[in-house]
Amino acid sequence: MKYQYTLILIFFGIFASAGNSLAAPSVSGVSGTLNHGNSITITGMGFGTKTTAAPLLWDDGSGVNVGDAPTAKGWTGGVPSYTGAYSAYSSSSMQYRAPGFRGTSAPNSHVSHYLGGAIMGYDYGGFFGANGMLWKDLTVSSPQNIYVSFYTRRDPAWERGNEDNYKEFNYCSAGLPYTLPESLVLVTFAGNQWASYQPLSKDGGGSIWGSDSANDYSGWAKRELILHTETSNGYATVIENGIQKDTWMGDLTKGPDEYGQLINMTGTGRVFSIGGYQRPDVDWTESPYPDNFKYFAGIYLDTSFARILIGNAATLTGSTTFRELQIPSAWADTSITATINQGGFSNGATAYLYVFDSTGTANATGYPITFGSGSSDTTPPAMPSGLSVS
């Protein structure tokens, strides 16, 4: 019987090793004290590989003084930016703000600063005064994956006007955001509908994605975008407050030129941005709009779908209150080291940990943890279905 048991365990080891890349990740334990900023180790199987463990950019505003440039956390740029003839409005430029700025609290107690700037209009600096956004230059591979998660809201005194053209994401050729050709622009109208504009045409077209999204007047909203650029299987999925709004599918390697003709995006340089152009009123002559501040916080941006998320429910679809990204520093198939981002969770709260591999596949059931406690990885790895030890 002992010999039979050994053979079965050897077979199990070979099967598990060969099948890790085919199965969803399985979390068997978490060690370390689960408090904000502490280091933890996650153990399990099927995590896959991640060439650079850390995300491309993580901006929690920690230790950043008000007035520091957005590039302090790795951004290529941020607007609005009021300089020169518009320097009188410099205090409204995109910069880090302490909680309580204009009566706006942070999304949670673990965010020390957030980014905010007021969109005045084209009469106040053109591109640099009509857009509220942050962007990052990328060197692309093919296909290109992009994942971003962040909190965002508008100032409570935001003036909507009679046309609320409100863009939230952009993926385009090298240069500034909205450099043609663009392969993706996601727009909201009147604060309650998503629409995809590119790559269908330069001046319009697109599909309405829902009737209950993008409402961030009354508080902070958590947005996620999953973007995969490929000729035949490209897609862009928007998730808002844990609810998938829709997925746009198509060729995301092309965009319109200045004449509206679809052309290939050449070269390896790209720009990805969050936020964007916002037109609170059709008539810019009524500007400036000093109350039209746009805010961002807790921004996680990466070019890999491999990530760690802690949610408030035992399933991902049920995690609609909190979905906090964790910051990995080492990544192997059976072990990950990460820094805790406690986000909106309080000490003593029960939460559930999910590990996504490079395909964006996560463990189906969240691994339960309790913030403020110490845990150890004593749970044995889950056995693949269909096998038994006798």
Image (cartoon, helix red, strand yellow):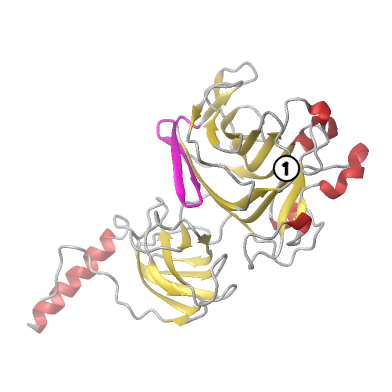
- Left or right? Give the position of 344 relative to 275: left
Q: Give residue 273's position: percent from left, percent from top.
A: 63, 42
Is residue 175 in sight in this rendering?
A: no
Which x, y percent locates residue 378? 35, 81
Q: Is residue 244 magenta?
A: yes
Q: Which residues are magenta?
A: 231-252
Q: Is residue 383 left or right of residue 315?
A: left
Towards the viewer: 305 or 188: 188
Q: Label 1 belongs to which residue?
A: 158
Label 1: element kind: loop
Q: Residue at x 61, y 44 (%)?
A: 138
Q: Dividing the picture into quarters, in which one does residue 105 lie?
A: bottom right
User: Which quadrant of the view contains residue 83?
Assistant: top right
Task: Identify which residue is drawn at 61% across, 27% down.
Answer: 181
The residue sitting at 55% across, 68% down in the picture is 342
- Mark 1, other Cα within 10 Å: few <14 / some 14–19 / many ≥20: some
Residue 324 percent across, percent down from the top left = 52, 61
As rendered, which of 306 and 51 lies closer to the eye? 306
Q: Main secondary structure of the magenta part?
A: strand
